[in-house]
Image (cartoon, rainbow, N blue to C red):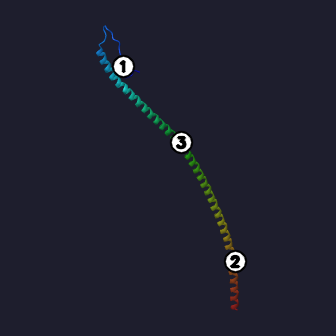
Amino acid sequence: MITPLDIENKTFSKQAINGYSTQEVHEFMAELLKDYEKIYKENIEYKDKIQVLNQGIQHYKAIEDTLQNALVVAQGTAETVKANAKVEADNILREAELSARKSVEDIGQRVLEKQLKLEETQKQFDVYKAKMEALLISQLELLKDINAEDQL
């Protein structure tokens, strides 16, 4: 690429016949040098800006990659937590069902025991009642005998 210094140091050979006006060539070269220096400096500034912007893009791409990786890890963790929670919920449910069955069985057993005890108590009551009835009948007979002796 031609630099502004190359333009400034450029010389042309002079021709004796039908040559260009030296002053016009120098004025044009000075104007060309001025415009070219401006464009050259802008070009360098734009290259620097492009480099800075490319570095920014690389930085943001790295952040994006990091965020994507973090998202993948978070999704994996969420799936793991969800699966673990489901397993734990299933275990809790299974334990609750077993506990409920055991409670029902225990209550059923206690009811059966109470029914047996009630039946036993009723039998004992019936025996007691029969004994009391027999005692009362014998006492009544005794009283009748005593009354019969007193009336004689």
Q: What is the number of the mark on residue 81?
A: none
Q: Which residue is mark 1?
A: 9
- Disc 3 marks a residue whose amino acid type is Val
Q: Secondary structure at mark 1?
A: helix
Q: Quadrant of residue 45?
A: top left
Q: What is the number of the mark on residue 73?
A: 3
**First in sequence: mark 1 vs mark 3:** 1
Q: Which residue is mark 2?
A: 131
Residue 11, placed above or below residue 72: above
Left or right of 136: which side holds 63? Answer: left
Left or right of 98: which side holds 12? Answer: left
Q: Residues within 10 Å of mark 3 (few under 14, many from 20)?
A: few
**First in sequence: mark 1 vs mark 2:** 1
Residue 109, placed above or below residue 80: below
Q: Which of the two discs, 1 and 3, sits closer to the camera?
A: 1
Left or right of 43: which side holds 73? Answer: right
Q: Secondary structure at mark 3?
A: helix
- Disc 1 marks a residue whose amino acid type is Asn
**Residue at image location 32% in from the left, 18% down from the top:** 29
Residue 47, placed above or below residue 136: above
Q: Position of residue 1 (x, y in %)?
A: 41, 21
76 vs 128, nearest the viewer: 76
